[in-house]
Amino acid sequence: MSFDALNLPAPLLRALADLGFESPTPVQAEVIPAVAEGKDVVVSAKTGSGKTAAFLLPVLSAILARPDPNCGARALVLVPTRELALQIQSMFEQLARFTPVKSACVIGGEAFKHQVASLRRNPECLIATPGRLVEHLEKNSTDLNDLEFLVLDEADRMLDMGFAEELYAIMQRCRSEKQSLLFSATFNHRGFSRVRSGLRDPLHLEIDHFRQINESIEHLKMLADDETHKLALTEALVLGMEDEAKAFVFCNTRLQAQQVSNRLRAKGVRSEYLHGEIAQSDRKQVLARFRDGKIRALIATDVAARGMDVEGTDLVVNFNVPFKGEDYVHRTGRTGRAGVQGRAVTLVDANEWNRAAGIERYLNFRMGVQALEGLEAQYKGPKKLKKSGKAASKTKRKKHASAAKGRKATKPSVARSGSSVESKSKGKGQQYRPLKPRRD
């Protein structure tokens, strides 16, 4: 199938050709016709599947088919993070480059008054994070009275981040005739029932199950003794890349991200770190330098695990094992995009073995085991494993053995009828009634 078969306007087809997109991905082939028919959709698709274009193309097509320069915002895309919002706006500008349709990005960390000025230009599409958009709605900087499309991208992540009340407040401000498009990795979140109540008989599309591992990525794990060993492994992995290649290194804490970046810089690697406490303007600069190839390694917390599509990212290193399977999918999804081969290496120490095994079981796959010559770990993994792949607990076995031994050594005595048993505890003895014989 080609994009021509989806009945897209000529300006959009021209933009797609310039971007080198020849045919739609499976999610695009399913979602675009459904949205064109006016249906609400609920979509599950894995990262890197082309879902951003899957909702932007039909929205742009509808706006171009019914131009109305005097109305307010006609489409709203809500996302969990600033980085994802900027990524979507970048894709919007590329797709809409041959059209008069404009967008505005409304996210935290940027000057409020500058965003007000952008909103006054009456853009057709708003791309926003929930918290900042609620601020603008409360201060009447914008309204959603003319909204035709509401897109909730990575809705599960927004709920996980505590944006439930903001989501509900925004949905109540939208006009009831809107068309809703919901994209999420999983639909089992307890907050989804209320979100889905705002959709009209939605069509459910499961293109790729969120637990489906990207086959374009080689998934490996390396055993590590401690954090110092992990630093040495990360350094060797990054230095071992080809000259033009880029790497993401994900850490669970801000301090670790800074430490890894400093270690790589000391070895001559152009690297920067990124986490939630860095000013938005600085985050933009770091990401721009990474995309331009001025930075070879970007060390980040999970703030960059979603929405970052950087060409030439060959390697993802999990300095720490992620806390959840979904986080593993999104971290490793920074490589192996659009069918290009990538590599994801997770560093696992003794305290993280069970968490890594839990992720493997949850996602129904196994990471290959690899070691770097000269940097092999003394830790070789658990001696005994459960069926789940987790380490067998020695403590539990010892407790069970001790309990069994105690039961054998201590045999309960039954007092004869008419006798009494005296307590051996300190102080005054206590008389008990005789035990009755059991009748089995």
Image (cartoon, rainbow, N blue to C red):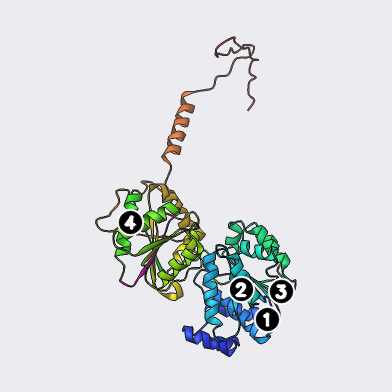
Question: Quick one: label 1 or label 4, which is nearer the N terminus?
Answer: 1
CA–CA distance between discs 3 and 4? 51 Å
Where residue 240 sits: x, y (%)? 29, 65
User: Of the numbered discs in the image, which one, if any, rests on residue 178?
Assistant: 3
Give the CA distance from mark 2 to mark 3. Answer: 23 Å
Crowd tier of the residue under label 4, counting other residues whose Cα lies within 10 Å: few below 14, some 14–19, many 20 or above: some
First reached walking from the N terminus: tag 2 or tag 4: 2
Contact between labelled residues 3 and 1, with CB atoms less than 8 Å apart: no
Is residue 172 something that shows in the picture? yes
Q: Residues under labels 2 and 4: Cα distance?
A: 41 Å
- Given the image, on which type of amino acid does mark 4 rest? Arg
Element under label 1?
Answer: loop
Which label's residue is closer to the chain start, 1 or 3? 1
Residue located beneath label 4 in the image: 263
Magenta segment, which residues?
A: 243-251
Residue 165 x, y percent position in the rendering: 67, 58
Label 2 vs label 4, nearer the camera: 2
Residue position marked by numbered label 2 in the rendering = 118
**Nearer to the camera, 435 or 67:** 67
Q: Quadrant of the C terminus?
A: top right
- Reading the image, the residue beneath label 1 is 37
